[in-house]
Amino acid sequence: MKNNIKMNQKIDPNWITGFTDAEGNFRLVLTYNKIEKWKYTKRANFTISQKSTSNECLYLIKDFFKCGNVYNKLNGISTYEVNKLNDLNKKIIPHFNKYPLLTSKKINFNLWKKGIEIINKKNHKNKTINEILEIINKMNSKITFEIKWKFLKLNIVNKINPNWITGFTDGNGCFYFKLSKTILASYELTKIHMIIYY
């Protein structure tokens, strides 16, 4: 995270989406209940992590959504996390419905959203557990390049908001000089999976 923002400035919602495309994570978790052995605890969360030296942006994001918490860990990593179902339903999901993700991370968000719809039903039957397990087994590292490519061909980006570009650059952009016989100045974006059409 580069210091492009200050603590007293408001964040544009497109910046939030761009930064999430770069650094955000959507997770579903099933935990076996040892007391009531026939039950599983179903949880969902939304997280964004940064090095603790750059965690000021996480507090701005927390202020923007007006929910969640920032956790500063001993390993030098800070994480903004929203795990309350009401906040995910009323604040996080509506935001990304209105300001959609532009990269292949949207695949993960769509699966995560389906999982939350199932959790909202508060049904503990095995069928429900199996439905969530099926979704979990399709998320994150399980999403192959072929799946991403097929999705992106069907979701070509026609126009990008400048604030999205700034947010994504804050997350994954790199500015550097390379010294050889000549001085080369470069700007680089990593992990960008999208198809742009102009």
Image: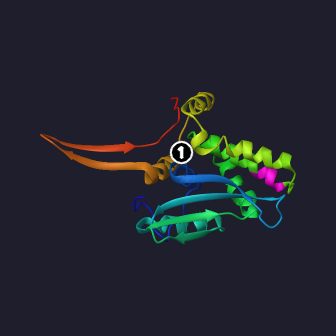
Tell me how many marks there are: 1
Prevalent SS, magenta region = helix
Q: 29 or 55, which is in the foreground?
A: 29
Q: Residue beneath label 1, please?
A: 161
Tell me the quarter of the picture where residue 134 sits: top right
Disc 1 is placed on an element classified as: loop
Residue 180 x, y percent position in the rendering: 15, 42
The residue sitting at the left extreme is: 181
Query: Above or below — where is 184 with respect to 27?
Result: above
For residue 76, what is the image quadrant? bottom left
Residue at the location (67% across, 42% down)?
A: 137
Q: Which residues are magenta?
A: 116-120
Q: Is residue 149 magenta?
A: no
Kind of residue at disc 1: Asn
Pick whichever, 93 or 14, lies toward us: 93
Q: Residues within 10 Å of mark 1 (few under 14, many from 20)?
A: few
Residue 176 percent across, percent down from the top left: 28, 49
Question: From this viewpoint, is residue 182 visible?
Answer: yes
- Give the x, y percent position of residue 131: 79, 44
Residue in the image at 40% along x and 59% along y: 2
Residue 145, how many percent across, how many down? 54, 32
